[in-house]
Image (tube, grey):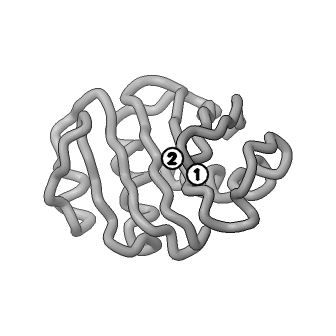
Amino acid sequence: MVLVGVKENNSWLVSRWNLTYRTGWEGILKACNSVKGYYASLEILVDNKVVNAKTEEEIMKLAEAGSLTFRGMSTIMKVPLMITFYNQLQAVDVSVAMATEEFSTADYEKFNKSLCQYMDSIELAMNR
């Protein structure tokens, strides 16, 4: 994924990323499944409505919609994180709490170094 930009907004770093390729709903569900074990209290939203899907099977059965968001405390990044994928689009929105020194400012280069490998791993999981 490529970081398009990052800005500060009410104690959050809000960023836009572009996928290498547009993806369909199945790829988005695969992305969600790839991270579900790495969030404390993972919450999944489909078109901004919370859904009760916890297992891989339940997630893969979610009805196709315009967007899927997963959010919670990332056990990898050690901060609250929210990622929104849009069906059939290359755009991905990511919000990270400004809760650690690593995520204290909207510095493009620093933010990209902190999150790029994580976001690339999610994109790879979409295509498995």
In the displayed image of the protein, which residue is found farthest to the front? 10
**Residue type indicated by callout 1:** Leu
Q: In which quadrant of the rendered view does residue 41 lie?
A: bottom left
**Residue type indicated by callout 2:** Asn
Alpha-carbon distance for marks 2 and 1? 6 Å
Residue 122 image position (x, y, % from top left): 55, 54
Reply above or below: 125 against 10: below
Residue 83 image position (x, y, % from top left): 46, 47
Query: Residue 124 — which label?
Result: 1
Query: Residue 5 — which label?
Result: none
Reply above or below: 23 against 112: above
Reply above or below: 115 against 19: below
Q: Residues within 10 Å of mark 2 (few under 14, many from 20)?
A: few
Q: Residues within 10 Å of mark 1 (few under 14, many from 20)?
A: some
Answer yes or no: do the residues labelled 2 and 1 have beta carbons within 8 Å?
Answer: yes
Residue at screen point 77% across, 47% down: 112
Residue 54 image position (x, y, % from top left): 22, 67
Judged from the image, the secondary structure of the residue bearing numbered disc 1 is: helix
Q: Nearer the viewer, residue 83 or 122?
A: 83
Label 2, on which residue? 127
Quarter of the image where the N terminus is located: top right
Q: In which quadrant of the rendered view does residue 88 lie?
A: top left
Residue at screen point 39% across, 52% down: 30
User: Is 105 left, or right, of 49 in this rendering?
Assistant: right
Q: Nearer the viewer, residue 25 or 48?
A: 48
User: Is 121 left, or right, of 81 in this rendering?
Assistant: right
Residue 79 image position (x, y, % from top left): 55, 67
